[in-house]
Amino acid sequence: MERKRRILVAPLDWGLGHATRCIPVINALLKRNAEVIITGSGSSAELLKNEFPGLKHDALPGYYPRYPTALTDSAMVFTMARQLPHFIKTINHEHTQINQLVKKERIDVLISDNRYGCYSPGITSVFITHQPHILMPESFKWIEPMVNHFNRRQINRFNACWIPAADAQLLGDMVPPVLPANTRFIGSLSRLKKLADEITYKVVVVASGPEPQRQILVDMLRAQLIALNLPAFLIAGKMDGPEKITVSGNLTEANYLGSEKLNHIIQQGEIIIARPGYSTVMDLDHLDKKAIFIPTPGQTEQAHLAQQLIQQGIAFSMEQEGFNMATALKKANKFSGFTNFAPDESLLEQAIQSIL
């Protein structure tokens, strides 16, 4: 009997989005009778353990980036720059561990979601990213060529680069005019699906991202939801503890929700307030929801995605500093929301077929 193909999946631990968009990839692999092993760190690793308790899980070094409390591009750039030695050290460590794991588990294919060190000579290594071209803030555009030289050099270590989108329309400048020959679009990915749930909440907040900005966002929005006395559900995006659902007046709150519960709660929301992280955008696109986005301060990628959605008339966004929910809800009425999403699973199926 032929041995099952053994696939190692390794998502980055910066927020939960890298892990959540790996869920449909893992499910597609399992449908093809592949044997999947998951490796990672931090909250993204915990999320995938909850989603796939029957699979084997291993650990990698965590990046654990520290983000500034100051709401400026300069603070973000300098804070990240100071951590570069740590990031490079982590990449080297994870590469060493990955090679050991590949040998130990007799891995046939390695799929890395934005982990630069997760490739291995002698087997097919795939890199998933929605940022083949990294954008820098306007005042730091002068270093963008150097950043992308490093990005391209690292991606070129992989046999294939997969972009989780149907095309470059939403990503805009994050996709360069000319892509390497080994790049392919694998379609919009989401762990969620459209349901027939009735609207229960005026607002559903889905908080996410690194500290301290996640907690700052949660505290700010909780206070405004209570003040407005709207029926609302706040998902705090805190994985290091119990789910812990509480109800206080108009506000229901949970630390986190598994995919099935999250799917239902988002569908029950009239409007979703969230970070415009790319995975969150794909989720709301799949569910045809209206949204208000609050980019993480200093994250150029999120600001770019939010601006793309404003220009396309899909979703309103407002900066975190000075955010006013009442004003945002009024302005959001002028936007269409995500509508008429037609999933095309063939792109992911073709990509999976190419590695199996």
Image (cartoon, grey):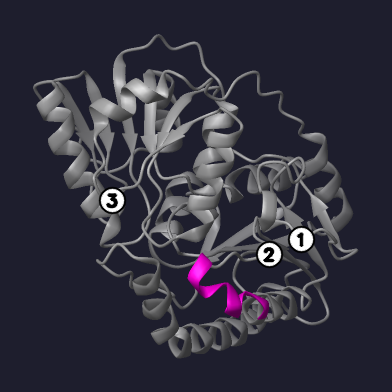
Q: Are marks 1 and 2 in contact (CB under 8 Å)?
A: yes
Q: Quick one: label 1 or label 2, which is nearer the N terminus?
A: 2
Rounded to the nearest angstrom, the CA distance separating label 3 from label 1 is: 34 Å
Q: Quadrant of the N terminus?
A: bottom right
Inspect the image, locate mark 1, and give the three-letter code of the amino acid beneath it.
Answer: Pro
**Left or right of 183 on screen, residue 24:** left
Image quarter of residue 293: top left
Please name the residue shown 15% across and 23% down the image.
228
How far across and how far down the image is residue 190, in percent? Answer: 59, 38
**Quadrant of res 209:** bottom left
Q: Position of residue 257 (x, y in %)?
A: 35, 38
- Measuring 81% from the left and 64% from the top, which residue is drawn there? 160
Image disc number at residue 176? 1
Whether 72 is among the magenta residues is no
For the point 21% across and 39% down, the residue is: 221
Amino acid type of the residue that numbered disc 3 sits on in the rendered structure: Lys
Mark 2 Cα-neighbour bin, 10 Å: few <14, some 14–19, many ≥20: many
The residue range painted magenta reads 137-145
